Amino acid sequence: MIKSFRDKALARFHATGETRGLSVTNTARLQRLMDMLERARKPEALNVPGLGYHRLKGNRGDTYSVSISGNWRLTYKWDGEGAVDVNVEDYH
């Protein structure tokens, strides 16, 4: 379950499909990833081949990441019940 977003454009995309304001162009893949995250019951649910799932390191060790396209990643934290601080970012 997705509980919160870091970006208003991403929250709007999730709610309505509106792509205005999103940095990533592969919105079909982003939608599939967000659908998976919405159904997830644990952060590792997105640990499937091809998604590049991993936990970040250092001061972002509480954040998980999966690949959208190029350097763009869907990142999220897990609060025990669902995904929080969901974001699209290029952290490379």
Image (cartoon, grey):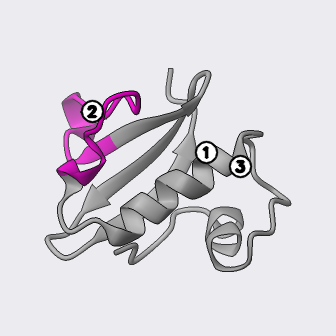
Q: Earlier in the sequence, mark 2 or mark 1?
A: 1
The residue segment tinted magenta is 44-64
Q: Are marks 1 and 3 in contact (CB under 8 Å)?
A: yes
Label 2, secondary structure: give it. loop
Q: What residue type is labelled 1?
A: Arg
Label 3, secondary structure: give it. helix
Alpha-carbon distance for marks 3 and 2?
23 Å
The residue under the point 44% across, 74% down is: 4
The numbered disc on residue 38 is: none
The residue under the point 77% across, 39% down is: 25
The residue under the point 49% across, 52% down is: 33
Of tags 2 and 1, which is closer to the observer?
1
Q: Residue beneath label 2, please?
A: 56
Of tags 3 and 2, which is closer to the observer?
3
Q: Are marks 2 and 1 in contact (CB under 8 Å)?
A: no
Q: Which amino acid does label 2 sit on?
A: Leu
Alpha-carbon distance for marks 2 and 1?
21 Å
Instruction: Name the image quarter holding residue 10.
Output: bottom right
Residue positioned most to the left:
80
Alpha-carbon distance for marks 1 and 3?
5 Å
In the image, is residue 65 above or below residue 41? above
User: How many residues crowd mark 3 within 10 Å: few (<14), some (14–19), many (20+)?
Assistant: some
Q: Residue beneath label 1, please?
A: 29
Q: Provide residue 5's location: percent of width, then percent of height.
A: 50, 68
The residue under the point 27% across, 33% down is: 56
Q: Residue beneath label 3, please?
A: 27
Instruction: Name the image quarter holding residue 31.
Output: bottom right
Per the image, is 52 magenta? yes
Q: Provide residue 18's location: percent of width, then percent of height.
A: 80, 68
User: How many residues crowd mark 1 within 10 Å: few (<14), some (14–19), many (20+)?
Assistant: some
Q: What residue type is labelled 3?
A: Thr
